[in-house]
Image (tube, helix red, strand yellow):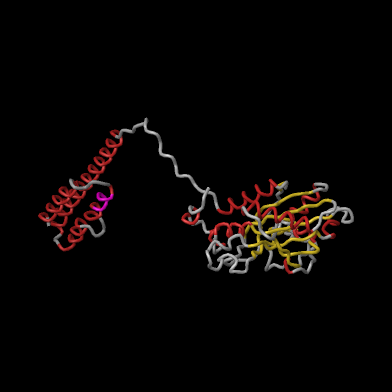
Amino acid sequence: MLVRLQAEQERLLAALAEVADEDALYQLQVAYLGKKGSITALSKELGRVSPDERKRLGAELNRAKAAITEALEGRREALLAEARARDLARVEDLTMPPRRPPFGTLHPLTIARRALIQTFRRMGFDVAEGPHVEHANYNFDALNFQPDHPARDMQDTFGVRDRRGAGDLVLRTHTSPVQIRAMLQRTPPVRIIAPGTVFRCDDDATHSPMFHQIEGLYVDRGVTMADLKATMIQFTAAFFGRALDIRLRPSYFPFVEPGAELDMQCPFCGRARGQTCSVCKGAGWIELGGSGMVHPAVFEAVGVDPEVYTGWAFGFGIDRMAMLMYQIPDLRQMFDGDIRFLQSFPG
């Protein structure tokens, strides 16, 4: 056993000279002094020798373990000293200019939102904002939503309870509450857009629980649907860089009367050189959103005389405009945070 013990010590000392880092040193320590190490294995053989031999061999084993531990610690200190010396010998050229961090890019939604705001500002609209957590009065009641309207159901709207447990707060389902706040704070004429985040219980390729809308409102004396259509013609021409036709299809929205779905002529048709347009699927029209004349009940809720003033409103998705601008097939791509997707956009 003494011969084997001496041989193990010599092998350890030879291996220590080859150790170049802390990890290799730890592996060597485990190989000799660990639970399954070679020195530990020799210790387990003491039970098979006589008591007198056990005492002598035990003393030799303890001496060998102490010597091995000392050798390991010595090599560890030497490694630390070598690392310290390398660190002190390192030379940094402080005259070299630093590397510039890579520039990020704007999110496609940010690009679309800024382009929309810039376009409407040039047309004379102010930008108004409102809270994400909204009172049901602003989100529904003042907008002529009846208490039994489906939009107020739990499966469509995220409810919020305050500290008192009251259930009259919601995550706003549209940017239309900003219309109410604007008309309560201003006297006509009112000419605003309201871009912002909204929330609904939707989740598929074209819907998200959180998405973005832009709302437009114009209130003054003698405002008509003709003004709405003219404004949309001017907007689409400025935004897409070419004159586009606009059509209004009769539709129902609680806060406008009459109401209409707002469609624009597809600005991408003809670019595929004879192929079917991938955006409008050959229909020639793209639905933007809802619009119409502000309902008299909405005016009465905010203290505006509907016998004196009229107005129109529209609303459509910023996300949808970004999808149109960049031919994005799935709305969820804009919220996944995939850097490869985000790097493909200008800005």
Say whether residue 189 is visible. Answer: yes
Residue 25 in the magenta stretch? The answer is: yes
Q: Residue at point 75% right, 64% down?
A: 260
Question: Could you tell whether 109 is left or right of 23 in the image?
Answer: right
Name the chief secondary structure element in magenta: helix
- Of residues 295 and 326, the one nearer the viewer is 326
Q: Quadrant of the N terminus?
A: bottom left
Say whether residue 163 is visible. Answer: no
Where residue 206 appears, x then y in whole percent? 59, 65
Where residue 159 appears, x then y in whole percent? 69, 62
- Of residues 24 and 316, the one nearer the viewer is 316
Question: Could you tell whether 149 is left or right of 62 in the image?
Answer: right
Question: Could you tell whether 48 is left or right of 207 in the image?
Answer: left
Q: Residue furthest right?
A: 307
Q: Residue furthest left?
A: 3
Where residue 148 appears, x then y in whole percent? 78, 69
Tally the marks: 0
Q: Quadrant of residue 177?
A: bottom right
Where residue 263 appears, x then y in whole percent? 68, 63
Residue 324 in the magenta stretch? The answer is: no
- Of residues 123 and 102, the one nearer the viewer is 123
Question: Could you tell whether 250 is left or right of 280 in the image?
Answer: right
Q: Residue furthest top?
A: 95
Magenta segment boundaries in residue numbering: 23-27
Q: Residue at point 58% right, 51% down?
A: 111
- Of residues 217 and 134, the one nearer the viewer is 217
